Image (tube, rainbow, N blue to C red):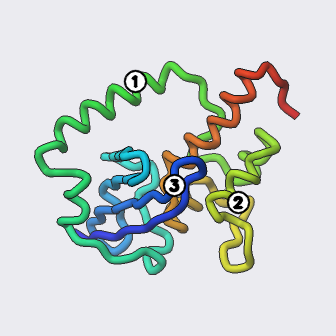
Amino acid sequence: MFYFKSSQPIPGKGEAITYYQCKDAKTIVRYVTFIPATGEIHRIEEPVVKELYNSGALGDATKEEFEQYWPVSEQEDSQSAEQQAEEDQGEKKTCFDLNMTIAEAMAVHPRVRDVFAAFHLGGCAHCMISEFETIGQVCAGYGIDADMLIEVLESLMQRENASGATRA
């Protein structure tokens, strides 16, 4: 197994560290994200995006670092908890998913561009993202926690629905 790590700022939550467990230099088996400021740990047993597109941009990690946030004894417990979370999520209507292109996502809400910029996606010459790439491809290529990005994008819609505003 190979282990990699990345970090990125998460708006409103601070710095997040994501540890990837890969069966080779590119194939993701599972990953875990830890946010020190909030103590949140997000474990993804079967990621939608299964390939790192830019593993050279990630830092090397160790098995011990990965297991610090995903101990071997908790694997079975976390899988059943994630299955319950997926069932709960199935009841919520979602507007964004990892298979959407960047252009499709930007068409859903005018502030999506701001969210991508907050995750340092597409704001400068060395990290340009194509409107034809999917959200999942962009996340894997830049080491962004895909679930966290989707959560932030969905929060745009939740805030809009809560305020009773209509989409532009």
- Furthest residue toward right: 168
Q: Are marks 1 and 2 in contact (CB under 8 Å)?
A: no
Image quadrant for the C terminus? Answer: top right
Q: Which residue is tagged 1? A: 87
Residue at the (21%, 57%) spot, across then down:
68
Residue at the (51%, 63%) spot, across then down:
8
Q: Mark 3 vs mark 1: give the one in front.
A: 3
Provide residue 11's location: percent of width, then percent of height: 60, 51
Residue 148's tag is: none
Q: Is residue 160 above or below residue 133?
A: above
> Is tag 3's residue or tag 1's residue first in the polypeptide sequence?
3
- Furthest residue toward front: 37
Q: Is residue 48 above or below residue 59?
A: above
> Is tag 1's residue or tag 2's residue first in the polypeptide sequence?
1
36 vs 95, nearest the viewer: 36
Q: Which residue is tagged 3? A: 14
| Residue type of the residue flagged with mark 3 | Gly
Q: Count neighbours of disc 2 (C-alpha within 10 A) and say few if under 14, some if 14 to 19, many if 20 or more.
A: few
Q: Mark 1 vs mark 2: give the one in front.
A: 2
| Residue type of the residue flagged with mark 1 | Glu
Provide residue 101's location: percent of width, then percent of height: 68, 52
Q: Count neighbours of disc 1 (C-alpha within 10 A) and say few if under 14, some if 14 to 19, many if 20 or more.
A: few
Q: Count neighbours of disc 3 (C-alpha within 10 A) and say few if under 14, some if 14 to 19, many if 20 or more.
A: few
Q: Secondary structure at mark 1?
A: helix
Q: Which residue is tagged 2? A: 117
Quarter location, residue 132: bottom right
Provide residue 157's location: percent of width, then percent of height: 70, 31
Left or right of 149, for residue 159: right
Number of labels in the image equals 3
> Is tag 2's residue or tag 3's residue first in the polypeptide sequence?
3
Provide residue 72's location: percent of width, then percent of height: 13, 50
Image quadrant for the N terminus? Answer: bottom left
